[in-house]
Amino acid sequence: MDLTRAEGMAPPPSSTLWFAIPACTVVAAVAIGLLLGRDDSQASTASGTSYDASNSGYRALYIILDELGYSIERTRRVAGGSVRWALAPIKPKPADAEHVAEWVREGGRLLLADSKGDLAVAVGVEVKIVNSDDDTVSTSLEDARELAVGTPTGVVIGTTPPGVAIGKPLVTPLRKADRNWEFAGGEPLVSIHKIGHGEVWLLHRPLALANEQMKRADNAIFAARLAEAMSDGNPGKIGIDEYCHGLRSRPGVLELLLQPPIRTATIQATLFVGLLLWAAAIRFGPLRPLPPMRRRSKEEFLNALGDMLHRHGDTASAFRTIQGEVNRQLAERIGLPANTHPETIVATTSRRRKITPQLAQLLTCAAPPSGRAGFVTAIQTLDETSHELIRR
């Protein structure tokens, strides 16, 4: 059997390049996401976070507020939400610090428990840090017992007179605060500073919320009161900032592809793939010309028909056939029976529409006009009558 392709046969369809390019693009994007994505296992080992159960961590604070029914969440974005707690933040990058400062200026409310002062300075609050010899100081939490008994879980948190374990670092702002929220030992424990449309709540004793202090005195009550005060007028959740400890949300593939410096390569690859698809795509050609006329015009046809009938001498029967068809169509149009006499059809039609005497004679005469020219003219007149009086 001869399997060779015969001459003139159409070539085989194009290759599957159109399907291969998008598939390769998706595979490459997934590979880039796997290479650049961060491992999330560092959350359980990072120190100073709300995951950390050591003395320097804040796991106890998170669990207590969560069990008491406060709306809190861990956030791994550089900024966002309405209320954020930055507990023991590390020194931020300049871009991150500017992002946080902009978020505060636009209306964010930030709690700073910063024993180093780097983030406080970045958001516009100059501070001075010293070590204090005090361990526990009394506060103005006069209703501590009532608050403890009335918690959503029904658990009594405090059993000692109102007091807060504060730790040694003391952070003092260099400029006067707009207002103070709580006092400890006669000194402000939390000062509030207006920054643009937002506020920075500076915790003067940054270790008061750490695990080591939360198990002593009334620090849990203090944390609950602080959460209530900062949530006042803010329906959103309290975000425990983990971004400031180096914990980042693992970005998706699209987010990675749209971040610099990969963004430029993504745009170039998209344009390149678009050009390849455009080159391989099926295009519409120019408009096809109208097909040539396969029949002669009506005048030519009637002339040829009349000439043929005249040569064969059958003009009378041909004329009567055309005349009878036109009369039948006229009768049907005006609502008369098909076998109505032609004179009655012409008379009824003339009352409704204008009919020339020549046309009335052609519709009622028994024989066609004599001569070839008269016969062709009669046929053309009857055809025009059929078009004007019946089909229009």
Image (tube, grey):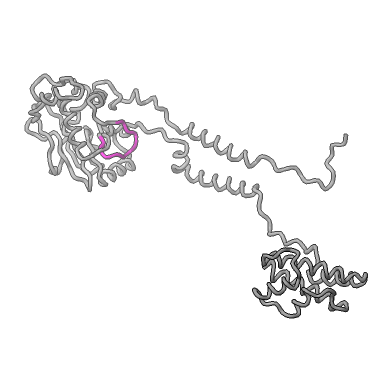
Front-lying residue, 255 or 173: 255
Answer whether residue 172 is magenta in the image.
no
The percent coordinates of residue 344 (x first, y second) are 72, 72
Q: Is residue 379 left or right of residue 141?
A: right
Q: Quadrant of residue 314?
A: bottom right
Location of residue 331 (image quadrant)? bottom right
Examine the rendered structure and indicate whether residue 230 appears above or below residue 290: above
Residue at screen point 19% across, 23% down: 214
Where residue 144 appears, x then y in whole percent? 11, 26
As rendered, which of 72 and 343 lies closer to the eye? 343
User: Outermost residue, right direction?
Assistant: 312
Which range is magenta?
Answer: 73-84
Q: Residue at x 76, y 71 (%)?
A: 342
Residue 309 image position (x, y, % from top left): 89, 70
The quarter of the rendered structure image containing the N terminus is: top right
Determine whether 19 is above or below 208 in the image. Answer: below
Q: Which residue is at 25% across, 34% downward?
A: 85
Residue 82 magenta-highlighted: yes
256 on left or right of 100: right
Is residue 339 among what the camera can see?
Answer: yes
**Residue 57 appears in the picture as rendered:** no
Residue depicted at 50% across the width and 35% down the height: 32
Question: Residue 71: where, in percent of width, then height?
Answer: 26, 31
